[in-house]
Image (cartoon, rainbow, N blue to C red):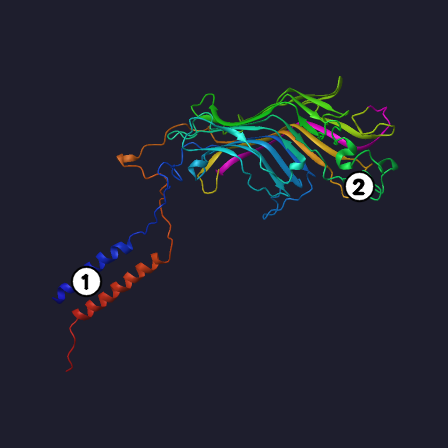
Amino acid sequence: MRLMALPAAAVLVALCAAPALAQPTTPVPGPRDPNQPPVSGTPPTTHVIADAGTGLAVVRLAPGSTPVNTTLPGLGGPDQATAEIGVGLANAQANTEAFLSYERAVAQASPLGFAVRGRSPQTPGTLAQTASPDNAEPLTGVLAPPPTPLDALLRVGLLNGSTHARWDDRLGPCVRPIADARTSVASLSALNAIPTLPSTSDLTGVAEQSPADLKHLPGPLSLLGGLLSGSPDTGARGSLLSLPDTLAARSTVELVDLPGSPNKAVRSTSTLQATSVRLLAGTPAEIRVDVVSPPTLTALSTGDESTSEITYTAPVLRVARGDRELGALDAAHPVLDLPIGLPLDDRAVPVVGGTPADRKLDIGVLRLQAAQLTEKTAVINGPLQPGGPVINGFMLGATARLLDLQLLPTEALGLPNLPSALAQVSLGEQVVRAAAPTGGAVCAPPPAPRGGQAAPPAGAPRQLAHTGAGYRTVPIFWTGTALLLLGVVVVAAVPARRPG
């Protein structure tokens, strides 16, 4: 009987300890809605990261006056504006490395976005479509801009938006397009006042160093001496920039054929459609800016630096007042300055872009700039996203603007603590970026599992997390129990010595 006690105790310990010695598992929660796509799916074999963004208009107050703070030294960007507001933002994104399956293709059309001193809250009213799963049809609708603290500076008409995000269950992003976003606005006016200037027409005691001609202006300086006061006949307010016709923006991300290879290149494209822009509309100083040729900005990444490229069709703008042409803006002549002068005769309001023969005192400058193309490139030698696979490839990006309007102060104002630029309106701001692995993106279905075994469930991690200290205390408990039983068996098996 004692000989059977030891094997029996060992078998009992093994049977009881087997569940505890097994690797503990934490089930991955699934979606509550059975029709909802899984939180994460099998990573595709194609590696693509790209985005394109287009804004119909961006207004900046006191640009470059707010420093950028960062927790990492040396990584701060250029100084930002005190306040920014963007209208009609169209953004298309593709990211095969995203953990969440519904963030691998995203198309958004937002009525506006704004930031105050570098902080940008979420903006409601955005039209968005994500994939996977695939969307056979785009999502369209009217974009209603919410109220913001900067409404006094910007008036926006009817905004329309359209978004389309695509994804193939077998080929991943090998669809066309991956993401497509569009916005359009029927009417828009920006900078109905200049908050960075005092709202008084009597500069006595404010601008001590100013000439006597600036002591009593025809209108408040914040309205540019009356230029933004509007029409007294209709009661309409004036604005520095306005659109008489529709302005449309489109952003797309797609894969295109790569010559001499079965793989694909990644292309991000930003396009704008505009007809005309008005400066100081409804005033004697009204200036017309006709868009002769609209811009297109494209980033094409093949994964190889020698064949990847940024393609930019620069806009051609013609600037005129009435029948008189003031100048042209294109790639060869991207800057045009128009002085704002206070006349020294009996005229009531300041003049803009007058002739050298005019007797006037310049109080500001309207600087018009077109194109402003900026490019950046980088070689990829690592994961596209933290924790992702190591990838070799090439990425590139660029930014450009259809028309950039800056209001610059002059020394004649004599106002203290003025920023280098009082206000800025960027019409048609474009951003494109694209990244691809060396040799291009592979459009092929994932390999079948070997040996006919079923593939693991989508999103199942190879090693699940330990979520509590109980996973360690349970094996310790059973180890102690086994040692205790072993001690009992040993004591029972060894005969006790009788005292001699």
In front here: 77 or 263? Answer: 77
Residue at horizontal 65%, vertical 31%?
426
- Which quadrant of the view contains residue 189? top right
- Element type at marker 2? loop
Q: Mark 1 against mark 2, which lies toward the viewer?
A: 2
* Quarter of the image that includes the N terminus: bottom left
Magenta part of the chain: 355-383
x, y percentage for residue 104? Answer: 45, 34
Q: Is residue 153 magenta?
A: no
244 displayed left or right of 409: left
Q: Is residue 310 visible?
A: no
In front here: 68 or 319? Answer: 319
Q: CA distance from mark 1 to mark 2?
A: 94 Å
- Which quadrant of the view contains residue 59? top right
Label located before the other in sequence (1 or 2): 1
29 displayed left or right of 12: right
x, y percentage for residue 333? Answer: 71, 23
297 displayed left or right of 24: right
- Which quadrant of the view contains residue 36? top left
Q: Residue furthest left?
A: 1
Q: What's the magenta bit mostly, secondary-structure-wise?
A: strand
Residue at horizontal 31%, vertical 35%?
449
Residue denoted by label 1: 9
Q: Which mark is residue 415?
A: 2
Q: Residue furthest top?
A: 323
**Kind of residue indicated by mark 1:** Ala
Question: As displayed, is residue 30 above or below residue 396?
Answer: below
